[in-house]
């Protein structure tokens, strides 16, 4: 099988499917998807600010922290970056741009993922510090902050700068979508080679091109792709589609990618991957009882009652010290055993191989969010019943059924979580081996043994898997539902 993710599993193209293909080619398809999410966001903000401040009985907390997160990861594993495709923040921004056209270009020094990786870590930190799952009003203000941020940045800078360089949710989706089975890609390379206008990137009258600067003939995979389909609508030859591909296959290929460059030369992108993966473990750890024992111990050692200080130290270690230590040691051993000292620096070696973390990191997020989603799936019914009753003054949808909750029997959850973790671990092992094999192919005849480069990464991935299994085996807070303990 070809290792080129652009040609892998090209047999499937959603644009060839009856109904679906016609809808996706419609230039207003994205708007149709955005309007319900915008209406939902408006309801969540209203209920979050004006409704009951008990989290399990408020639309803001239930829909955000139980349903939104679960639906996002399920969409990513089944199809792709569908949330960014239907992002309501961009709908408001597009309306704003009818009255104001930004002229500035995003600063060159900030055209990386360093700031985005920091903002993703900061969002995870704020989630714990402010107990957002239990605070409807704070959740509502977070939604408003997102709308304001998107409007402020994209009112000042051309393109989709907020999406590409800042949005923590977008960065999460970009990394996770590397595991997705679909990608936006060209249908015929020859058609692109004969094109003179390059409308997919430049746009044409009445239709903009790609605002994330991903030139379709040079685009590889899903990184930085919001599935907005602007390139599709701008192409006059209908030469851009949504094709099937082998999930995670772009992780072991290292071509020059339009708008991104080579993965192996992007330590900022590798850092984002590390935050994504270790953040999955830290987010789960913050929901199990051992974390409270650790926080109490840290408070005694620091002689402080400051929650922010203890939590900041916990995040500094969990997202900084531990990832740097483990990746540094693993990279050093792998580089040494592969006898690659003269060919690559340690930082470059770690950058090349860090992408093996992605499938396992996504598996941890998927197992964690699936747990909350499945245990609290039906909670939206009584919350919606209560909301309508409060608004109308009569129970139009019936009396709230607060007893509703799980979608599946509790006995199914642990095997499901273990299965998702196992799939993520296997995918990461495959990526690590392919990356090590690529190192062997690029070396001289006396070059690095594949197993020497692979084994340290296999050990690291197995340790992370063991940590994830231990975490998922702990009693976990069922945040945002009436079953929270």
Image (cartoon, rainbow, N blue to C red):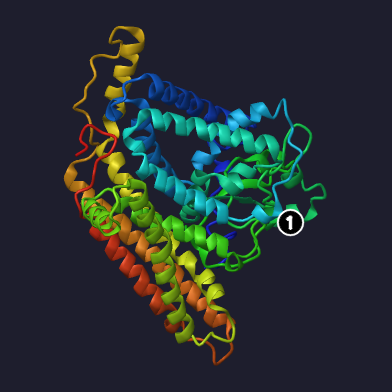
Is residue 484 rendered to the left or right of residue 134? left
Q: Is residue 458 above or below residue 303?
A: below
Element under label 1? helix
From the viewer's side, name the closer residue of 206 and 68: 68
Residue 139, visible in the rendered structure: yes
127 to 387, vertically: above or below: below
**Quarter of the image that includes the C terminus:** top left
Of residues 176 and 196, the one drawn nearer to the viewer in this rendering: 176
The answer to which quarter of the image holds residue 141 is top left
Side of 142 relative to 461 (left or right): right
Q: Position of residue 73 (x, y in %)?
A: 41, 46
**Residue 468 placed where, x, y %?**
29, 59
Q: What residue sits right under mark 1 in the picture? A: 190
Residue 180 as seen in the image, left or right of residue 59: right
Q: Residue at 28% across / 39% down in the picture? A: 479
> In which image quadrant can residue 407 be found?
top left
Q: Residue at x 75, y 31 (%)?
A: 206
Q: Nearer the viewer, residue 420 or 232?
A: 420
Q: Residue shown at 37%/39% (left/top)?
A: 130
The mark tally for this picture is 1
**Residue 136 x, y percent position in the rendering:** 36, 29
Q: Is residue 413 left or right of residue 38?
A: left
């Amino acid at each position: 099988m070809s290792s080129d993710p652009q040609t892998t599993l090209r047999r499937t193209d959603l644009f060839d499917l009856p109904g679906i293909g016609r809808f996706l080619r419609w230039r207003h398809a994205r708007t149709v998807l955005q309007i319900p999410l915008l209406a939902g966001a408006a309801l969540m903000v209203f209920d979050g600010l004006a409704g009951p401040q008990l989290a399990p009985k408020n639309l803001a907390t239930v829909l955000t922290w139980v349903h939104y997160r679960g639906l996002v990861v399920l969409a990513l594993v089944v199809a792709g970056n569908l949330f960014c495709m239907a992002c309501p923040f961009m709908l408001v921004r597009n309306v704003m741009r009818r009255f104001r056209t930004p002229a500035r270009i995003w600063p060159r020094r900030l055209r990386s993922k360093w700031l985005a990786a920091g903002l993703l870590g900061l969002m995870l930190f704020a989630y714990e510090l402010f107990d957002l799952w239990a605070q409807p009003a704070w959740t509502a203000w977070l939604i408003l902050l997102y709308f304001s941020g998107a409007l402020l940045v994209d009112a000042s800078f051309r393109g989709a700068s907020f999406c590409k360089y800042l949005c923590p949710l977008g960065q999460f989706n970009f990394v996770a979508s590397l595991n997705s089975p679909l990608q936006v890609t060209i249908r015929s390379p020859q058609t692109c080679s004969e094109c003179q206008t390059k409308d997919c990137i430049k746009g044409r009258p009445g239709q903009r091109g790609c605002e994330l600067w991903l030139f379709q003939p040079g685009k590889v995979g899903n990184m930085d792709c919001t599935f907005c389909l602007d390139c599709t609508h701008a192409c006059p030859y209908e030469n851009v589609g949504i094709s099937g591909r082998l999930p995670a296959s772009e992780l072991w290929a290292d071509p020059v990618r339009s708008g991104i460059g080579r993965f192996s030369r992007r330590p900022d992108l590798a850092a984002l991957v590390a935050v994504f993966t270790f953040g999955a473990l830290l987010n789960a750890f913050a929901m199990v009882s051992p974390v409270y024992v650790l926080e109490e111990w840290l408070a005694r050692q620091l002689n402080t009652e400051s929650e922010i200080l203890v939590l900041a130290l916990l995040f500094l270690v969990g997202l900084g010290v531990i990832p740097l230590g483990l990746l540094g040691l693993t990279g050093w051993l792998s580089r040494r055993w592969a006898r690659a000292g003269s060919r690559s620096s340690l930082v470059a070696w770690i950058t090349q191989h860090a992408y093996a973390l992605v499938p396992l990191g996504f598996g941890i997020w998927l197992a964690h969010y699936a747990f909350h989603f499945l245990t609290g799936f039906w909670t939206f019914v009584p919350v919606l019943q209560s909301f309508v009753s409060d608004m109308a003054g009569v129970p139009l949808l019936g009396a709230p059924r607060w007893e509703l909750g799980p979608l599946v029997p509790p006995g199914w959850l642990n095997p499901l979580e273990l299965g998702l973790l196992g799939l993520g671990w296997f995918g990461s092992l495959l990526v690590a081996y392919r990356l090590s094999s690529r190192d062997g192919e690029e070396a001289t005849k006396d070059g690095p043994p594949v197993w020497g480069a692979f084994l340290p990464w296999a050990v690291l991935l197995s340790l992370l898997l063991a940590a994830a299994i231990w975490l998922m085996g702990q009693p976990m807070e069922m945040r945002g539902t009436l079953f929270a303990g």
